[in-house]
Amino acid sequence: MKALSKGIIITLLASVVTWTMASDDVEAILQNSFVAKNQATMDRLERDAVQAACSAPRGMPLNNDMLTTLRQERLKAVVLPANSQYLGDWQRGSDVAGNGRGLQSSDDPSKPNGGNCYACHKLAPDEVAYGTLGPSLTGYGARGQSEAMLKYTWTKLWDTHVYNLCSHMPRFGAQGILTEQQLKDVMAYLLDPASPVNKAVE
Ligand code: HEC
């Protein structure tokens, strides 16, 4: 029995050592394979606490208290719009949703960033080019415009990690990808009954 538990301990230690070495190697490979170009600088490789936690190798146990604390910190940092003015102009929002430019080394940093929502979501039903990494948002406006709904959608767009810590969706507000006005316009694109997102195809 003693030998067995000794064996288990040695195996566990060995896997921790292997994992540490592997993660150091990965770090070095990442640093060596990227070059800074224009606005895509090397600090892009620095992970914040959420990214570090979510990059843990598959199957590694994560500390639940740590995850709850991280989620609470993200929620506290969300900036809601003044006077509960959540909705802008859906037409401008449509441009933001369809624009995949911004933040890449080849993009002009003086131009506003896009939200690239169509890369991952279906939105207006007559748009045929869309990705399916995220759920379809067609008809999203049917959820109504209650304060809770507005706040949920804004928070999801501001920092998706509040609701789903390891989400693949960009943190549009928290990372300064979209401006407050652009976020309001996208909100209107999602929620305004006149927006194509909420119109059936004819
Ligand atoms: C890189 C992919 C990606 C991009 C780009 C992206 N999303 Fe998402 N989004 C997701 C994924 C994946 C989910 C579902 C999982 C989750 O909640 O994180 C999601 C969830 C959502 C939800 C919640 C859906 C629900 O049923 O409550 C909303 C709203 C949303 N996205 C809006 C947007 C908008 C608006 C944009 C553009 C400004 C956008 N997303 C850009 C991947 C993306």
Image (spheres, grey):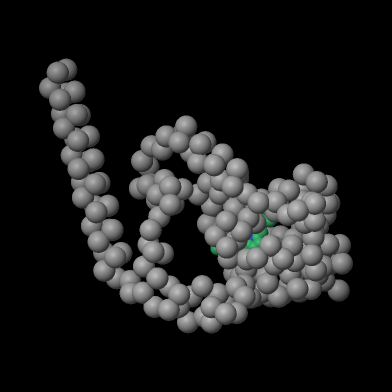
Q: Nearer the viewer, residue 182 or 122?
A: 182
**Residue at position x 52%, y 36% from top?**
68
**Horizontal relation, residue 23 to residue 83: left or right:** left
**Horizontal relation, residue 67 to residue 135: left or right:** left
**Residue at position x 79%, y 51% from top?**
84
Instruction: Give the answer, above or below, for where 9 lies relative to 124.
Output: above
Query: Looking at the image, which residue sits at the far left?
Result: 3
Give the quarter of the figure containing the N terminus. Answer: top left
Instruction: Give the answer, above or below, for where 2 lies relative to 84.
Output: above
**Residue at position x 77%, y 48% from top?**
149
x then y, percent, for residue 128: 69, 75
Q: Nearer the viewer, residue 192 or 37?
A: 37
**Horizontal relation, residue 9 to residue 142: left or right:** left
Q: Picture quarter containing residue 112? A: bottom right
Give the number of callouts: 0
x then y, percent, for residue 127: 72, 74
x then y, percent, for residue 160: 59, 52
Query: Looking at the image, which residue sits at the far top?
Result: 1
Instruction: Give the answer, above or below, for where 182 lies relative to 8.
Output: below
**Horizontal relation, residue 61 to residue 8: left or right:** right
Q: Picture quarter containing residue 116? A: bottom right
x then y, percent, for residue 93: 74, 69
**Residue at position x 50%, y 49% from top?**
166
